[in-house]
Image (cartoon, grey):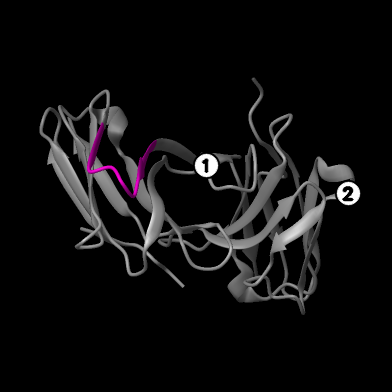
Amino acid sequence: EAGVAQSPRYKIIEKRQSVAFWCNPISGHATLYWYQQILGQGPKLLIQFQNNGVVDDSQLPKDRFSAERLKGVDSTLKIQPAKLEDSAVYLCASSTTSHVKTQYFGPGTRLLVL
Amino acid sequence: SQQGEEDPQALSIQEGENATMNCSYKTSINNLQWYRQNSGRGLVHLILIRSNEREKHSGRLRVTLDTSKKSSSLLITASRAADTASYFCATDTLQGAQKLVFGQGTRLTINP
């Protein structure tokens, strides 16, 4: 079974630029999560999708972050404009249903904002 | 906000020794999960323990849960160099939307 795919693996941008991350979950997984993990901390949930609908985006900075999951499969997370404090690893995960069970994580995208 | 707090933040032991990590949380939970993260990688699920369970085993892993103290521990027996990683507890709370809230993690180093 193929795992969660993410791209790019690394991205370096200057502040105020925009950036987009892509995630393809495990086939058949209805729930998709985006996390932000700052160095030395645990992952923080940014947004949770159930199919193509948003279940929880309470910690998503909506003035600069946006995410979509068209057709309920792959997803993109965008930051516009980026700030220095957005430097982090962005992790995508998926699970079988919205009821919390085991989450399967991708390798993450490491973002550095200069 | 972080629900779980791992202790210690860092742990360094010799190969073959046992490693114990602790996690404390604040609000009532449905279940508690432990994940491992190797450097530069995503998280890997290790074990899930439900709120009505007290102990669970998986290979060299032993997890305990004390809901009265709102705490859990992860024991890795006969540690190996490959166990070097960060370990996170994650709680699925009863309040609000069902989602996992991760702690800060314990960074475990196994010295050969």
**Residue A65 sits in quarter:** bottom right
Residue extending furthest top?
A1
**Residue A36 sits in quarter:** bottom right
Q: Is residue B5 left or right of residue A100?
A: left
Label 2 secondary element: helix
Q: Residue at horizontal 29%, vertical 33%?
A: B83
Q: Residue at horizontal 58%, vertical 63%?
A: B97
Q: Is residue B35 left or right of residue B83?
A: right
Q: Position of residue B42 (x, y in %)?
A: 52, 42
Q: Residue at horizontal 89%, vertical 44%?
A: A71
Q: Amino acid at mark 1?
A: Lys
Q: Residue at horizontal 28%, vertical 42%?
A: B53
> Which residue in the structure is indicated by mark 1?
A101
> Which residue in the structure is indicated by mark 2?
A70
Tell me: residue A87, above or below residue A68: below
Q: Position of residue A9 (x, y in %)?
A: 66, 44
Q: Position of residue B29 (x, y in %)?
A: 39, 58
Q: In the rendered structure, are the residues bearing label 1 and label 2 in contact, judged by CB atoms less than 8 Å apart?
A: no
**Residue A11 sits in quarter:** bottom right
Label 1 secondary element: loop
Residue B103 visible in this rendered orientation of the protein? no
The quarter of the picture where the N terminus of chain A appears is: top right
Tag 1, which chain? Answer: A
- Distance from label 1 to label 2 (Cα)? 23 Å
Tell me: residue B40, above or below residue B15: below
Q: Position of residue B34 (x, y in %)?
A: 37, 44
Residue extending furthest bottom?
A63
Magenta span of residues: B47-56
B89 is within the stretch colored magenta: no
